[in-house]
Image (tube, helix red, strand yellow):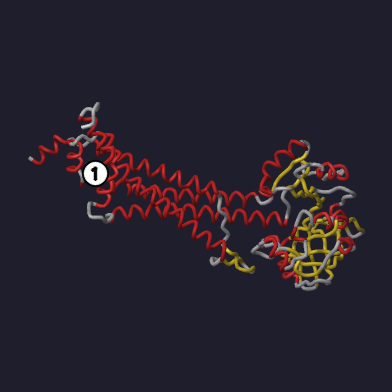
Amino acid sequence: MRKGLSPSRQANNMDNRSLGFVASRFLTSGKGKINGRHWLTFCGICLGVFALLTVSSVMNGFDQDMRQRVIGTRAELRLESRTKAPLQQQDKLLPALLKQPAIKAASPVVRNELVLVNSRGMAATVCFGIDLTAHRKVSPVLLPFSAEMRHKSDSQWIQGIVSGNPDASALETGGIILGSELALSLQAAVGDTLQLLSPLGTVPTPFGMLPRTLPVRVEGIFIAGMPEYDRLYSYISLESARFFSGYTDEIDYIDLKSNDFRRLFSITRSLQKAFPGYKVENWSAYDSSLYNAMHFEKYLMLVILGLMFVIASFNMSGNIFRTVVLKRRSIGILKTLGYTDREVVGLFFRQGLAIAVTGICVGILLALALLSIQSATGFIQLPVGNMPNLILPVYLKLQDFILIPLVALLITTLSIWLPSRKAAAVEPVSLIREVV
């Protein structure tokens, strides 16, 4: 025996060194192969982590994809009156906005809900009056589309002008740019003439109030990547839009482009402080119902999969309870040899942690492999109406690959701890009496 240590202390040192060996014997039942029930527990944990990481990354991908489509068509930010009244003195407001460090471009907009008519039919449209040169700096949907642009932007959808080559002068002389679905519903092509009219009577005549009408010429057709936008949106010049709104030099709001769209929420707050008399919104407010539905769906899916993981952790608890019952005699012998209650708990704790940590790590690797293959090849595609199939988007966030495994480890640790405490309650004396 080592000098200076009591026999019980020396036994405890021996037991501490033997915990890993005894735990591995319990895990393999002493036959060198892991028991089948341990494999089931391992697979449940592995699949739970894999599903959580995969679904989270796919939902992140959908969120990013939708954000890029909305921003590409509308704008990243919008400044308007708090009372929805027309904005005046834009000549002073626009330079003040462009002086903000976070703002890259600004474009005045006049919005109207109008009707397009030709000999083949009629269709409602949300018509935006814009300065085409300024608006192209804010909204890439009005830039001429080319395969080179798509390659540079690494975009999986077509977004831009796909027919015609409109310029600012063409728009100012009665031109209009139509969404692809809107043009299809009217069977309109570049060069066709349409009648643009207001559905409400706004011009007094001897025959009563008649709608304002304006002949327009199709100068271009765009694809936004959002079926709703392609079906409803059109663009005309600011002066033509003011004619329908009854404005002189007023506008409805100003579309803005930031220097970093990843910081839109913080930029929105800073602009709101800089312009307290106005209302500043970012893209999430344009289609708030869609934005909220996407986030609610993401959190709901994570909660459902999290509950499934909790159920898998119940299997871990039951598995360890079963092991404790089957190994009661071995536990009694170990406690007779000097194992403390804490060491007995640690014995089963190590066994459970070995299964949990291995399952979590394998789940992370499987999720990374599948998501990387999808990002590289796009082999999973989804049909989207009349548009080309949508490649299932994925976006890997570092915090997801840290937070989800940590939460999974916490849940499995709790499921291991409770049954492990049961093993410490085994009394060697009672076992001896049962044997005798």
Picture quadrant of residue 118: bottom right
Q: In which quarter of the image is the N terminus?
A: top left
Q: Which residue lies furthest to the left in this view?
A: 436
Front residue of 179/163: it is 163
Can residue 202 be spotted in the picture? no
Residue 389 visible in rendering: yes
Callout 1: helix, strand or loop?
helix
Compared with 189, 71 (above or below) is above
Q: In which quarter of the image is residue 102?
A: top right
Q: Is residue 78 left or right of residue 307?
A: right
Depth check: 150 or 63 in front?
150
The residue positioned 58% from the left and 64% from the top of the image is 391
Q: Going 92% across and 59% down the picture, which residue do you hit?
A: 206
Task: Point out residue 228 in the picture as x, y percentages from the top left corner.
Answer: 68, 61
Q: What residue is at 90 percent from the left and 55 percent from the top?
A: 204
Image quarter hosting the C terminus: top left
Q: Which residue matches tag 1?
A: 324
Q: In this view, does 52 lie above or below 19?
A: below
Q: Where is residue 296 in the image (x, y as percent from the top left)?
A: 55, 49
